Amino acid sequence: MTQRCGHVAVIGAPNAGKSTLVNALVGQKVAIVSPKAQTTRVRLMGIALEGDAQIILVDTPGIFDPNRRLDRAMVSAAWEGASDADLILMVVDGKKGAGAKVEKILEGLKHRPERKWLILNKVDISAKEKLLALTQKLTELCAFEEIFYISATTADGLPDLKVAIAAAMPEGAWHFPEDQVSDATERLVAAEITREQLYLQLHDELPYASTVETEKYVERPDGSVEIYQQILVERDSQRAIVLGKGGSRIKLIGATARKELAELMGVQVHLYLHVKVKAGWDEDRSVYRDMGLDWVE
Ligand SMILES: Nc1nc2c(ncn2[C@@H]2O[C@H](COP(=O)(O)OP(=O)(O)OP(=O)(O)O)[C@@H](O)[C@H]2O)c(=O)[nH]1
Ligand SMILES: [Mg+2]
């Protein structure tokens, strides 16, 4: 049997639904998702199978006008994810429509040599009559080979998209074992699941002012795992919020993350969280290295 295998970069503005789409195509959760913008910080591969094709989806951070070093590193990781891809999926939130962010990405995209498809996402909450005008506007700004209308949450349009992507993959041997769904290490998965809870449970600037590092990951003889993580924040006041009254918030963050990790990994998990104030962690090279982000000047 001939095999197909290729890289598909999933790019777009923050919150467009890129990670939700990657999870839906893979068929299980490999990337964290939240209603807040800039959830994804590093490139991550989700691996989907369709017929004879292995589709290596590259989920990327949303592209926006970066200020902080961390933001610049995220945007640079996103564009790097697109380079040399066999196919780029540009995901646009059909409800939010075009706008300065989306237009700027199209500006950067239009001269790129890779194949480009436009994915209008969130059709379940978009006004149908507006989608046509939106499509016209977007395709005037950048030429797309194909256009798909989907909902990553209801799976509307997804089976057709998946079959089309598979057919667009070049012939070649699969790069990953059949049962592998992502390129993330267990340490990274664990840190991401805890970080997802920070995005879901904390408000204002706190998710952006924090990060999670897995310090120790130990498999016990009984098959369960012990995971030690550090939540880094910028200031004492932020540490107090993450801890919550009498430690109630950190307890809930830990309990929810632990439960989800246990489900994902299929083993019992003991999760130990520690909140540490580290002013300027987002200016520290070692934090970037641990996260898997390049240091940008
Ligand atoms: N109604 C609806 N909501 C969606 C759909 N796809 C994604 N969402 C929601 O949109 C929000 C953002 O989804 P993400 O997948 O985190 O978006 P993203 O593009 O990866 O965002 P960043 O990583 O921040 O760039 C979440 O609340 C999702 O549940 C969709 O098709 N329909
Ligand atoms: Mg994301």
Image: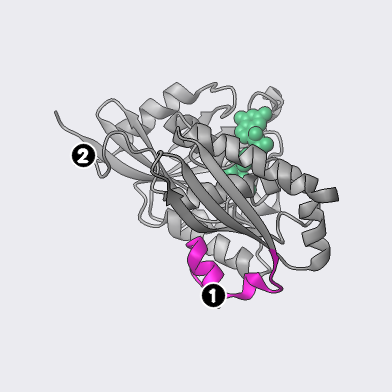
Can residue 201 be seen from the camera position used here?
Answer: yes
Q: Secondary structure at mark 1?
A: helix
Q: Position of residue 24 (x, y in %)?
A: 50, 30
Q: Amino acid at mark 1?
A: Arg
Can residue 296 be seen from the camera position used here?
Answer: no
Q: Mark 1 packing: few (<14 Cα in 10 Å), some, or many (20+)? A: some
Q: Compare residues 241 and 47 and report the one nearer the observer.
A: 241
Q: Amino acid at mark 2?
A: Glu
Is residue 1 located in the magenta-colored stretch of the structure? no
Q: Is residue 284 left or right of residue 217?
A: right
Q: Secondary structure at mark 2?
A: loop
Q: Compare residues 176 and 167 and report the one nearer the observer.
A: 176
The residue sitting at 23% across, 40% down in the picture is 174
Q: Quadrant of the N terminus?
A: top left
Q: Is residue 53 left or right of residue 285?
A: left
From this viewpoint, which residue is outermost toward the front?
Answer: 221
Quadrant of residue 231 in the image? bottom right
User: Which one is closest to the eye, mark 2 or mark 1?
Assistant: 1
Residue bearing the label numbered 1: 285
Q: Mark 2 packing: few (<14 Cα in 10 Å), some, or many (20+)? A: some
Q: Is residue 178 left or right of residue 102?
A: left
Q: Position of residue 34 (x, y in %)?
A: 66, 41
Query: What stretch of residues is rendered in magenta?
Result: 276-296
246 w.r.t. 70: above or below: above
The residue sitting at 38% across, 38% down in the picture is 181
Quadrant of residue 232 in the image? bottom right
Quadrant of residue 180 in the image? top left
Q: How many marks?
A: 2
The residue sitting at 40% across, 28% down in the picture is 162
Is residue 293 located in the magenta-colored stretch of the structure? yes
Residue bearing the label numbered 2: 171
- Tell me, for residue 148, which label it has, or none: none
